[in-house]
Image: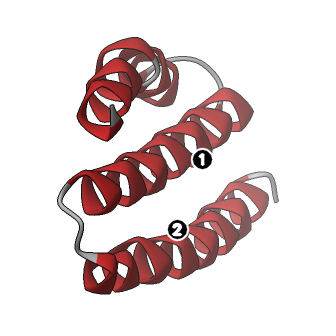
Amino acid sequence: MWTVASIALLAGALPPGIWLSARGIAAHRLVGMQMVATVTVLVLITISLAAHRPDYLIVATVLALLAFAGTLVFTRLIGAGDD
C-alpha cells in the first residue's frame, strides 16, 4: 500500500511542481520549489514505511529542514533582485 502511495505521489504531484519551478515569475518558482520539496519529503516517508525501516525517516526530516532553509535563501535572493 505504501509503495503505491509513493508511486502516485511521484507520478501525480512531482511533475507539476517541477514544471512550476522551472517557468514563470520568481514567486511561482518559489511555490514550485516548495511543492517539490514537500512531495519529496512525503515520498521519502512513504518509502520508509513501505520498507519497514523507521530509521530512514531521518532523511526526510533533514530534507524538510534544508528545504525550509533553501526557501529562506531563495526569498532573500528574490528580494535582493528587486532593489
Residue 43, image x, y percentages: 36, 46
Tell me the number on the disc at residue 83: none
Three-letter code for the amino acid on which mark 2 is drawn: Ala
| Number of numbered markers | 2
Q: Quadrant of residue 5?
A: top left
Helix, strand, or loop for circle 1?
A: helix
Q: Which residue is mark 2?
A: 67
- In percent of width and height, residue 75 lies at 71, 61
Give x and y (percent) for residue 7: 26, 25
Identify the image's colour scheme: rainbow, by chain, secondary structure or one colour: secondary structure
Front residue of this view, candidates 82 and 14? 14
- Counting from the top left corner in percent of width and height, residue 33 is at 52, 43
Camera-side residue of 47 and 52:
52
Q: Residue at x 63, y 43 (%)?
A: 30
Give above or below for 48 relative to 73: above
User: Is the Cβ of the residue at disc 1 closer than 8 Å to that at disc 2?
Assistant: yes
Q: CA distance from mark 1 to mark 2?
A: 7 Å
Give the vertical position of 83 relative to 36 (above or below): below
Query: Which residue does the image show at 60% across and 47% down from the upper left?
Result: 34
Give the residue at mark 1: 34
Q: Identify which residue is drawn at 41% across, 71% down.
A: 60
- Within-10-Å neighbours for mark 2: few <14, some 14–19, many 20+: some
Image quarter where the C terminus lies is: bottom right
